[in-house]
Image: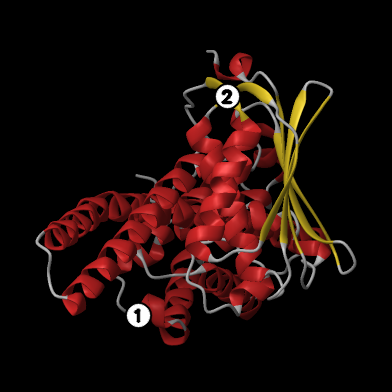
Amino acid sequence: MNPHLIPTDDLSLSSYRMLALRETVLHSWETQVRANLASARQLSHPVLIDTMPVLYERLCSVLSPAYFERDGIDVTSIGEEHGIERANLSDFDAEGILAEFQMFRSVVFDVLDAHDVILTAPERRTLHLTIDSAVRESVRSFVTATDSLRERFAGALAHDLRQPASNMVLGANLILRLNPSPEIAQWAQRIVKNGERMGTMLKELLDALSIQSGDRLALTLTEFDLMALARSVTDRAREYQGADVRLTGSSVKGWWSDAALERALENLLNNAQKYGDAGTPIDVSVAESNGRAILSVRNQGKPIPAGELDAIFQQFVRSSDAGASTTSSWGLGLPYVRSVAQSHGGSAVVYSDAHAGTTFVIDIPVDARPFQQG
């Protein structure tokens, strides 16, 4: 009975000698990994060893030209499975995976040299390239798997928290209806305000996770005036947030989702107020050009670094300046803005420099109905 995971016929002498050292290599590797990586110490042997026996035998195979030509050597799937299992069954991070492969590489060549397995320069190079391929695929699949796990956890948590947040707001509003003392009313109002804010953040999180998974926002489209919507949003920003907002432009009627565009504009105004210079106005403009509606929000302040302009539209990413802000945020407002624009068949872009300030632009067709069909 063949104890190995690969056929041993047609193997070269170097492959046979290397294959005979499999258990020595794997034992030495496991010992080093447990000694040097805290994330490996509590793992059982079967979980820690994972796909390394298969990888080692594939390394043996590449030293046999006849075997290579007949079956080909591809360690992509081995690396992928290793990364996925590390994500699902351990506390490893990407650095841990790189470290364990570095130790594996060192152990392989140290054991071969110690047992006088002489390899040619091309053979050593082939082993290095094969290990590099396994490392690359392992880290890539690990990152993908951990992102997926994180998103599923965040989605489940956000979904479960929405009901308690809603109940908190409902309870506080019931207290306010009982005409409580001024002090109790003040605290109840704070509960309402923060509960509503929590609900908004949770909804943004769920939307962002939906966007990340590639789902298009399902929009209900009606015909309305974008200028009227912008006026309503900017009026609220002045009244409730004390924002210094200047609205210019003209009436632009079209078919869009009023709820989605209202929220997108609110996000842009909040962003402008948070990161714009104090005492400077926020300029909102509504215009029409070539059958497209152009909605822009501009604020004065420190420009966004050029290398971060596109990244700020990505989920869970905030600019370096925002990272130092005391304003709590999921960093989900701008990804939502872009998704709303794209779901209308348009785009969202940003321009930023020290002289002109930072301008976010939503550019969408006047009639978005064709982009919501099918």
Circle 2 SS class:
strand
Q: Is residue 253 above or below residue 10?
A: above
Q: How is the image coloured?
A: secondary structure
- The residue positioned 14% from the left and 58% from the top of the image is 171
Q: Nearer the viewer, residue 238 or 195?
A: 238
Relative horizontal placement of residue 190, taking residue 323 as reference (left or right): left
Quarter of the image with the N terminus is top left
Q: Residues within 10 Å of mark 2 (few under 14, many from 20)?
A: some
Q: Nearer the viewer, residue 227 or 344?
A: 227
> Which image quarter: residue 120?
bottom right
Circle 1 SS class:
helix
Percent position of residue 117, x then y: 66, 69
Q: Nearer the viewer, residue 64 or 233?
A: 233
Percent position of residue 243, x then y: 60, 64
Relative horizontal placement of residue 275, taking residue 8 as reference (left or right): right
Q: How many marks?
A: 2
Q: Residues within 10 Å of mark 1 (few under 14, many from 20)?
A: some
Name the residue tied to disc 1. Answer: 41
Whichever of labels 2 and 1 marks the residue nearer the N terminus, that label is 1
As drawn, the residue found furthest toward the bottom would be 35
Q: Is residue 50 visible?
A: yes
Q: Between label 2 and label 1, give the one nearer the viewer.
A: 2
Q: Is residue 336 visible?
A: no
The type of residue carrying mark 1 is: Arg
- The residue positioned 51% from the left and 59% from the top of the image is 239
Percent position of residue 268, x then y: 62, 53
Name the residue tied to disc 2. Answer: 224
